[in-house]
Image (tube, helix red, strand yellow):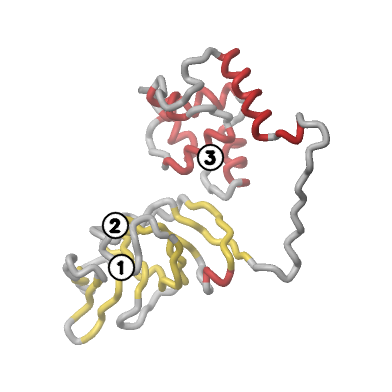
């Protein structure tokens, strides 16, 4: 099993790309990480998320990240071929994907341009760390991707996060992406994104005469009490909508 940092270093040097250049290439894809962050990946001081690693694989032209990490990938039909065989197979695949390049008189389908008054999109930060619909995950604000979503879906959101767990079912499910309007206060009964002692949650806020609690919609989970006098408690924002 190969070290991910060593894989990145090897292919980065093979591509003659510096850590700073890799940082800039990732920025073009909406992933913001500094040269020091890339150095931390390569030395093993910091872990890289699977999603970001896939972007790195594409930039560095790593053909099979599973094979690089685990060795032989039995699910990859190219794994049994040498470099020359892989090149021939890829050439044939290209012929299948782009038949217009090889078929005489092939019809080319053209698609109409999206009208100027078509659906509007907005750019949001999608944070790599998930918010817990269970027992809590830390929201790492240093790593995020810029995504484009229809403005009618975002409904005034400022950022997006991914749900982990089932405690907010049946409304929010594991792996759902939720859009969040950034604000520091919520009314009693509103659903938001919270940080409690460095753990990030998606929950419903209960704030009344009984005290302050983070409430799960799934009744098998108990309310999480918030002790405002001694807990580190913050509100990141109000959940506007979600997509599956």
Q: Nearer the viewer, mark 2 or mark 3?
A: 2
- Residue highlighted by disc 1: 170
Res. 154 in view: yes
Residue 169 falls left or right of residue 71: left
> Where does label 3 land, which residue?
55
Relative to the observer, which residue lies in front, 101 or 58?
101
> Mark on residue 165?
2
Q: Earlier in the sequence, mark 1 or mark 2?
A: 2
Q: Residue at x 49, y 38 (%)?
A: 54
- Label 1 sits on a secondary structure element that is loop
Q: CA distance from mark 2 to mark 3?
A: 25 Å
Location of residue 154 in the rendering, given as x and y in whole percent from the top left corner:
52, 69
Q: Is residue 104 left or right of residue 146?
A: right
**Helix, strand or loop for disc 3:** helix
Name of the residue lying farthest toward the right: 105
| Residue drawn at 57 percent across, 23 percent down | 13
Say whether disc 2 or disc 3 marks the residue closer to the N-terminus.
3
């Amino acid at each position: 099993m190969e070290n991910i940092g060593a894989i990145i270093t090897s292919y980065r040097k093979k591509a003659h790309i510096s850590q700073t250049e890799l940082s800039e290439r990732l920025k073009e894809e909406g992933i913001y990480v500094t040269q020091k962050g890339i150095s931390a990946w390569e030395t093993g001081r910091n872990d890289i998320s699977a999603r970001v690693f896939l972007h790195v694989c594409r930039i560095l032209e790593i053909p099979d990240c599973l094979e690089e990490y685990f060795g032989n990938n039995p699910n990859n039909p190219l794994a049994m071929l040498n470099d020359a065989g892989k090149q021939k197979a890829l050439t044939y695949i290209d012929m299948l994907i782009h038949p217009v390049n090889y078929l005489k008189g092939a019809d080319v389908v053209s698609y109409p341009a999206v009208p100027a008054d078509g659906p509007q999109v907005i750019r949001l930060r999608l944070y790599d760390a998930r918010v817990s619909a269970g027992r809590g995950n830390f929201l790492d604000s240093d790593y995020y991707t810029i995504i484009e979503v229809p403005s009618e879906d975002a409904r005034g959101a400022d950022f997006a996060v991914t749900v982990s767990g089932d405690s907010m079912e049946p409304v929010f499910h594991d792996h759902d992406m939720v859009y969040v309007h950034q604000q520091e206060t919520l009314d009693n009964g509103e659903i938001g994104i919270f940080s409690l002692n460095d753990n990030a949650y998606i929950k419903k806020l209960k704030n009344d005469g009984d005290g302050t609690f983070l409430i799960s919609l799934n009744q098998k989970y108990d309310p999480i009490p918030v002790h405002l006098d001694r807990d580190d408690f913050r509100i990141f924002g109000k959940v506007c909508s979600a997509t599956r």
